[in-house]
Amino acid sequence: STALVLFRRDLRVADNPALSAACAAHAQVLPVFIHASGEDGEWAPGAASRWWLHHSLAALHARLGSLHAGLQLFQGDTLATLRELIRRSGASAVYWNRLYEPASVARDTQIKSALQQDGIAVHSHNAALWCEPWQIATQQGQPYKVFTPYWRNLRPQLQATEPLPAPRVPGWRELADSLPLAALDLLPRIAWADGLAASWQPGEAGAQELLEIFGDDAIGNYAHARDLPARHGTSRLSPHLHFGEISPRQIHFALDRRTRATDTRQRPDVEPYLRELGWREFAHHLLYHFPHTPTGNFNPRFNDFSWAPADQASLARWQHGRTGIPLVDAGMRELWHTGWMHNRVRMIVGSFLTKNLRQHWQHGARWFWDTLVDADLANNTLGWQWVAGCGADAAPYFRVFNPVTQAKRFDPDGQYLRRWLPELAVAPLALLHEPWRDADLLRRSGYPAPMVDLGESRQLALDAYGALARG
Ligand code: FAD
């Protein structure tokens, strides 16, 4: 019998439960990717995600080639295309790995019941998470809203079990009219993506390589170095996780095996890293149970918050790293050039936008959505609602990051600032953190004066947030 394997954001062959199950049960498999623009609701992939997807599909095709198979590409409505492929291939079953975004859940539910009515077996699997969002609940049977008790429940259930190997593909079925990759038209038309290409290797092999590097160089010092944006102190696996080129199970198993082999006295502490993957799980738990949150405040009190009116000129300065606040600008430029930004800096640019500029967090979420290679509806929603203070388990409203203090603390020698603000690279350290103290430096370098006074705008934010807190 023949089975279709529908790839979406599970772009790997190892530890891919849908692919493995199909290969185990059928004589022939037909791996397909259907580009269905318009089926993601309001959150169609942004430019950076499309760039990544293009290269990841190429990598998956090559990887399947090493298993004597290939990826077939199609475009159009997913259900209609599947029905057509089933008709032409004679497939009796469809396999996929689950997605958790509200638009995907609704679509997949509909496709599943339509195909079942056609007499086709539909098998869906979990490839992306340790634990399905509905498998974990409070004692009252409710979804969690706070991370720590969520993690206290989940962590003891996690074991470093061996992930599935790449399957043996029994037989590969090929249809004649599969599209060439270029026909999906995923690449940007401007030369902006050169920096992305220099920074990343999309695909399963790129993910494994980063995991190796992280395990060799960084895991032992993660708890400390993860806060230093100048260093490669984190795994940078986020885009690979988003596209399913690697799974939390694979990461957990690899790190566990590696650290087990180490002398216990030097055994690096994997726990803080697993906890971050726990935040990713929690974000998916929240998105699944509270599907309105990508556009609506988790905390409804914020529906009355006095955001400043949308200000396109201010937003443009923030987006392009021209706010005059060095750490904010360095982060925004890192994002533009590489499609990624360090987590601590994400919090700082987010705090600046929502508190110092008092622009609605949706403006930030949308810009990140378009420019991040790891743009992920669950994680991005959680991150922005956390920063703005309106999220489930959010930063307290009076927490306004001071970008100068943060830079002095987490980039003490200015390495990160100098890397992303070349016009200030020769400035002495004290001025690098506060260039506005030397009008001559601003004039010579062309670096802008701050667009807001940090102290005054902080006070205005505290007043507005305080009024909300007092009701
Ligand atoms: P590591 O420190 O190596 O962590 C390992 C993995 O754990 C990450 O790859 C990621 O999958 C997960 N993780 C780590 N921190 C978080 C977190 N705070 N929340 C959820 N998962 C986490 N992450 C995204 O993947 N996509 C987004 O769109 C996104 N938007 C964000 C927006 C804001 C405003 C903020 C403050 C954070 C956002 N994050 C997002 C979370 C975090 O910044 C990134 O996951 C992290 O920087 C990725 O780098 P890394 O892979 O080196 O992380």
Image (spheres, rainbow, N blue to C red):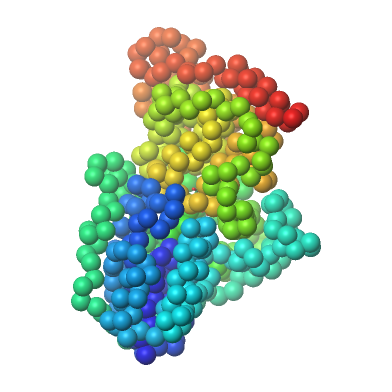
Q: Residue at x 43, y 9 (%)?
A: 439
In percent of width and height, residue 55 lies at 31, 58
Q: How many marks overall?
A: 0
Q: Is residue 34 visible?
A: yes
In percent of width and height, residue 139 lies at 79, 63
Pick the front one: 200 or 96: 96
Name the quadrant containing residue 77. bottom left
Is residue 293 positioned above or below 158 on the image?
above
Q: Is residue 407 visible?
A: no
Q: Residue at x 69, y 68 (%)?
A: 157
In percent of width and height, residue 371 lies at 39, 43
Pick the front one: 367 or 154: 367
Q: Residue at x 61, y 42 (%)?
A: 297
Quarter of the figure with the N terminus: bottom left
Considering every residue shown, the one lying at the far right of the view is: 139
Pick the front one: 318 or 228: 318
Quarter of the figure with the C terminus: top right
Is residue 227 positioned above or below 161 on the image?
above
In percent of width and height, residue 341 lies at 46, 41
Report the side of 447 relative to 386 (left or right): left
Q: Residue at x 29, y 64 (%)?
A: 75
